[in-house]
Image (spheres, rainbow, N blue to C red):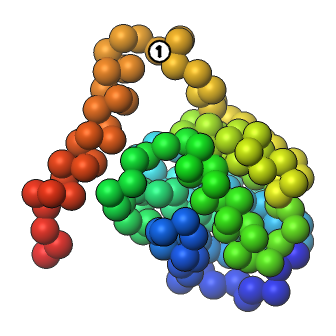
């Protein structure tokens, strides 16, 4: 269990060249929750209170989502898995349980594959692990996301 206090306002961890947003709620064994694509930790609003009774829930906004800004880095499952492993280390944890839904499931899977020493238990919900089952239109759309993100950085200015 981490020594960090619960902070519903959230924190940022400087990991792998980005500032990764996370929140800590509850006490017990650490459980990192990773949301689906285009979402945030808030996607788990109905589920997380029940888990907080027995776990220290660590909710993350994945790279390029919610309160974690996108940079010139590509959106990449492997790199995002490295981000989660680095967050576990940043929090002073030896290991954590990791739960991921959809995109978060793919990131959780990469975290476990690339950093098995950091993952205790793995829970995957509707997680893609390869693209061969996707419709061609979906593959094309998903491939354009990294390009669209890069173009958005060039043309969008903060208000």
Q: Residue at x 15, y 57 (%)?
A: 154
Nearest to the observer: residue 83 or residue 49: 83
Q: Position of residue 42 (x, y in %)?
A: 52, 60
Label 1 Cα neighbours within 10 Å, binned few <14 / some 14-19 / many ≥20: few
Residue 71 higher or lower than 137, as above or below:
below
Q: Position of residue 123 (x, y in %)?
A: 78, 41
Q: Which residue is mark 1?
A: 134
Nearest to the observer: residue 44 or residue 65: 65
Q: Quadrant of the C terminus?
A: bottom left
Can residue 35 be seen here? The reply is no
Of helix, strand and loop, which one carries label 1? loop
Q: Residue at x 75, y 71 (%)?
A: 89
Can residue 39 be seen here? The reply is yes
Residue 117 is left or right of residue 78, and the answer is: right
Residue 122 higher or lower than 30, as above or below:
above
Q: Position of residue 106 (x, y in %)?
A: 62, 37
Residue 135 is left or right of residue 52, and the answer is: left
Q: Quadrant of residue 12?
A: bottom right
Q: Quadrant of the N terminus?
A: bottom right
Q: How many marks?
A: 1
Q: Position of residue 115 (x, y in %)?
A: 78, 50
Q: Quadrant of residue 88?
A: bottom right
Nearest to the observer: residue 78 or residue 40: 78
């Amino acid at each position: 269990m981490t020594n960090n206090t619960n902070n519903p306002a959230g924190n940022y961890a400087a990991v792998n060249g980005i500032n990764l947003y996370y929140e800590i709620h509850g006490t017990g064994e650490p459980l990192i929750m990773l949301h689906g694509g285009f979402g945030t930790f808030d996607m788990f609003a109905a589920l997380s209170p029940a888990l907080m009774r027995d776990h220290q829930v660590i909710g993350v906004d994945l790279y390029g989502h919610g309160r974690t800004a996108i940079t010139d880095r590509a959106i990449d499952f492997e790199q995002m898995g490295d981000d989660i492993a680095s967050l576990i280390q940043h929090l002073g944890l030896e290991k954590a349980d990791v739960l991921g839904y959809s995109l978060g499931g793919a990131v959780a899977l990469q975290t476990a594959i690339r950093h098995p020493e950091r993952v205790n238990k793995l829970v995957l919900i509707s997680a893609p692990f390869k693209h061969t089952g996707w419709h061609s239109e979906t593959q094309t759309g998903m491939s354009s996301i990294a390009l669209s993100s890069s173009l958005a950085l060039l043309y969008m200015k903060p208000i």
